[in-house]
Image (tube, rainbow, N blue to C red):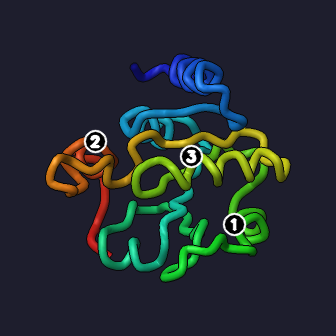
Amino acid sequence: MSCISDILTLARTRAEQQGVNYSGDVTPLEAYTLLQEAPGTVLVDVRTRAEWDWVGRVPHAVEIDWAEYPDMTRNPNFITDLRRQVDSEATILFLCRSGVRSRSAASAALEAGFTAAYNILEGFEGDKDAFNHRGKLGGWRFHGLPWYQG
């Protein structure tokens, strides 16, 4: 699937089916397609500085932590930082470790007046497997998308 409008329509359908209050849910591969083919699309990585440094980074992503490490309290400057670094009219794709914090970030962005805020399903590392390890059941890295060690 490479048509931008098809990806966004499917993303909105997924969100409607779940009753979420952000623009939609995209898979990692769909997110990468949007970044490559839809001008002005921005990936915002909402993981913590520790995750960026120790687990890995996505090239050209805007990094704004949703929660602050180590106590994981919500970053009170998230929306301020987002407004400073990302155009409110841009299509924004939010990424976290497993796709949970990014939903909250997308919702907060829409509530703050951003026009297109999407969650990237599976996140950077995906869900835990039977051995409590991430990286084998989905996620940005699992799908072989660009990343580098922080």
Residue at label 1? 85
The kind of secondary structure element at disc 2 is loop
In which quadrant of the rendered image does the N terminus lie? top left
Q: Position of residue 106 (x, y in %)?
A: 65, 47
Q: Amino acid at mark 3?
A: Leu
User: Which of 150/123 is in front?
Assistant: 123
Q: Along the polypeptide, which appears first: circle 3 or circle 1?
A: 1
Q: Position of residue 98 (x, y in %)?
A: 41, 51
> Closer to the camera: disc 3 or disc 1?
3
Q: Along the polypeptide, which appears first: circle 1 or circle 2?
A: 1
In which quadrant of the rendered image does the C terminus lie? bottom left
Q: CA distance from mark 1 to mark 2?
A: 28 Å
Whether residue 115 is visible to the viewer of this picture, yes or no, is yes
Relative to 51, is 147 above or below?
Answer: above
Q: Along the polypeptide, which appears first: circle 3 or circle 2?
A: 3
Whether residue 4 is visible to the viewer of this picture, yes or no, is no
Residue at label 3? 93
Q: CA distance from mark 3 to mark 2?
A: 17 Å
Q: Is residue 35 left or right of residue 1?
A: right
Name the residue at 39% across, 72% down: 51
Mark number displayed over residue 138: 2
Name the residue at 78% across, 47% down: 114
Q: Is residue 2 left or right of residue 43?
A: left
